[in-house]
């Protein structure tokens, strides 16, 4: 037996919700196992853990379910000298524990007004459950799960997924919480983060030392409440953003949180020295867009260069007679938003901005070799989004130096996750690396962990490890190499 715990769920057995069925069918079981069918050979030089967060709802929603509401569940595959172990665990958030205690949902999600929640809650919008279901990183040897609406960072042992409580940073953890997409600078061991809130100061930026102490925390002046999702960094700078897609301020005053895209406003990028004071941030105006995720940033002479995904249409229109679901999920269709790799160049001396596409291919959720984060890099591995659904049909290896792209599709009805990059020992080329992803194969009702050689994607996976059951589709993931 691999099941270590089974949770009770009150979700319908034949759930018709598109993000609680098919590839997004949630799980109620937690497993620990080393007994898995392996096809191919697990590379003996692949040592470390692959961690992926997942929105995995347990209870029927109060009102409509949005796929970002699900409870955080971490899936982990550890690799050690050719052996593997799989575990999955719910993140034991305060919200999940409270709902398990009463056996039903206590908080309304993103698609409902906060007033529908049965209890006071937290997060930037207020009266929400901090589901800790968005992102995961490893800092100072401990996995930290996080939530896009700002909340606690839940600590887990990256090998056992045992809960280690909430991050405190020496008692200085910000009252406004921390957004998803904290950044770990592997050269210094520091963690960089931001949070946002609906009252001034609307944004904060901070740095945590390799010893888990909050060593820098400053307010960032913004004209109003914003919804930043990601940040980037170079060795000397941190890069924040003010995208013109945010809650309608007039409606917000009436307790309605409706996201609007203000297409006549520019996107602003704020570049601040890593330990800079609030007034040291420099803002650059760019073409209007919303950027969900950045790829990487680095310094080049007087320039700070930033790669990310530019959305041609951050707020795709839908027919007025569309279903509520079609309206709600239009922000999840990367094809409708026309999200494509893009490069911005900011001259720190002259203030000039140069920007343009890196590729015409619609993609997002890029992963790089994290040892290149903040430095010039060559390869990004992005996803091939499913048309009309928030799932990933394949991955694209994009060479940002030559512009060449190699596409790998997972197969009919098979969706993948963010594919992490595990640098090989003694690597000489940047793509001397293993790529790892979890897949959900709906037609065959199985999930696998796939390992590819980054230099030989077309050769197919070098190893396929079958998980104990089909897992839900998920997005953000990280790789933590074993310490040598
Ligand atoms: Fe994200």
Image: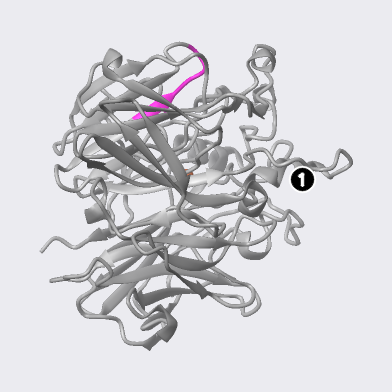
Instruction: Report x, y in % for residue 5.
Output: 46, 60
Q: Nearer the viewer, residue 353 or 70?
A: 353
The N terminus, quarter of image:
bottom left
**Secondary structure under the numbered disc 1 in the rendered image:** helix
39 or 423: nearer the viewer = 423
Image location (x, y in percent) of residue 75 = 42, 60
Decide which of 279, 117 is in the foreground and name it.
Answer: 279
Residue 456 inside the magenta-drawn segment: no
Q: Which residue is mark 1?
A: 325
Query: 439 or 291: nearer the eye?
Result: 291
In this figure, what is the number of numbered marks?
1
Decide if ligand 1 comes within 8 Å of the CB at mark 1: no
Q: Residue at x 28, y 59 (%)?
A: 369
Q: Is residue 313 left or right of residue 406?
A: right
In this rendering, does residue 120 appear at all? yes
- Residue 197 part of the magenta segment: yes
Q: Is residue 133 visible?
A: no
Where is residue 70? Give x, y as percent. Answer: 57, 46
Q: Residue at x 55, y 60 (%)?
A: 361
Residue 33 image-quadrant placement = bottom left
Instruction: Please give left or right for residue 320 compared with residue 44 in the image.
Output: right
Instruction: Name which residue lies at 55% across and 36% down.
Output: 289
Who's the residue at 74% across and 36% down the image?
63
Query: Would residue 53 be found to the left or right of residue 299 on screen?
Result: right
36 w.r.t. 27: above or below: below
Q: Residue furthest bottom?
A: 40
The range drawn in magenta is 194-199
Give residue 115's position: percent from left, percent from top. 68, 21
């Amino acid at each position: 037996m691999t099941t270590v715990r089974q949770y009770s769920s009150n979700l319908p057995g034949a759930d018709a919700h598109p993000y609680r069925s098919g590839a997004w069918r949630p799980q109620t079981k937690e497993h620990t196992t080393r007994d898995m069918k392996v096809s191919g050979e697990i590379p003996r030089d692949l040592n470390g853990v692959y961690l992926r967060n997942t929105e995995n709802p347990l209870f029927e929603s109060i009102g409509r379910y949005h796929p970002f509401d699900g409870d955080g569940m971490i899936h982990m595959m550890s690799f050690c000298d050719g052996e593997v172990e799989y575990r999955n665990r719910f993140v034991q958030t305060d919200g999940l524990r409270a709902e398990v205690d009463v056996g039903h949902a206590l908080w309304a999600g993103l698609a409902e007004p906060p007033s529908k929640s049965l209890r006071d809650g937290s997060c930037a919008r207020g009266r929400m459950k901090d589901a800790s279901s968005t992102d995961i990183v490893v800092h100072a040897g401990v996995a930290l799960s996080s939530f896009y609406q700002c909340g606690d960072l839940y600590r887990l042992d990256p090998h056992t997924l045992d809960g280690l409580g909430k991050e405190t940073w020496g008692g200085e953890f910000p009252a406004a919480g921390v957004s998803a997409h904290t950044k770990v600078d592997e050269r210094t061991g520091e963690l960089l983060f931001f949070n946002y809130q609906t009252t001034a100061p609307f944004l904060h930026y901070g740095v945590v030392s390799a010893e888990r102490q909050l060593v820098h925390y400053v307010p960032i002046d913004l004209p109003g409440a914003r919804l930043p999702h990601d940040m980037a960094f170079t060795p000397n700078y941190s890069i924040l953003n003010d995208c013109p897609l945010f809650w309608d301020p007039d409606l917000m005053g009436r307790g309605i949180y409706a996201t609007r895209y203000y297409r006549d406003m520019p996107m602003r990028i704020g570049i601040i020295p890593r330990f800079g004071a609030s007034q040291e941030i420099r803002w650059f105006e760019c073409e209007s867009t919303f950027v969900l995720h950045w790829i990487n940033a680095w310094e080049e002479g007087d320039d700070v260069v930033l790669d990310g995904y530019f959305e041609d249409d951050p707020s795709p229109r839908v027919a007025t007679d569309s279903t509520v679901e079609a309206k709600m999920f239009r922000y999840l269709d990367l094809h409708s938003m026309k999200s494509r790799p893009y490069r911005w160049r900011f001259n720190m001396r002259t203030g000039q901005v140069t920007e343009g596409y890196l590729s015409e291919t619609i993609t997002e959720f890029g992963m790089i070799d994290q040892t290149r984060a903040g430095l010039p890099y060559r390869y990004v591995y992005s996803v091939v989004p499913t048309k009309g659904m928030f799932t990933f049909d394949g991955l694209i290896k994009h060479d940002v130096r030559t512009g060449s792209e190699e596409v790998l599709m997972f197969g009919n009805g098979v969706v993948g996750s963010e594919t992490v990059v595990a640098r090989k020992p003694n690597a000489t080329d940047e793509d001397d690396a293993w790529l790892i992803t979890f897949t959900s194969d709906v037609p065959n009702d199985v999930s696998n962990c796939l390992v590819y050689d980054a230099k030989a994607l077309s050769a197919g996976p070098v190893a396929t490890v079958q998980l104990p059951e089909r897992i839900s589709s998920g997005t953000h993931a990280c790789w933590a190499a074993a310490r040598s």
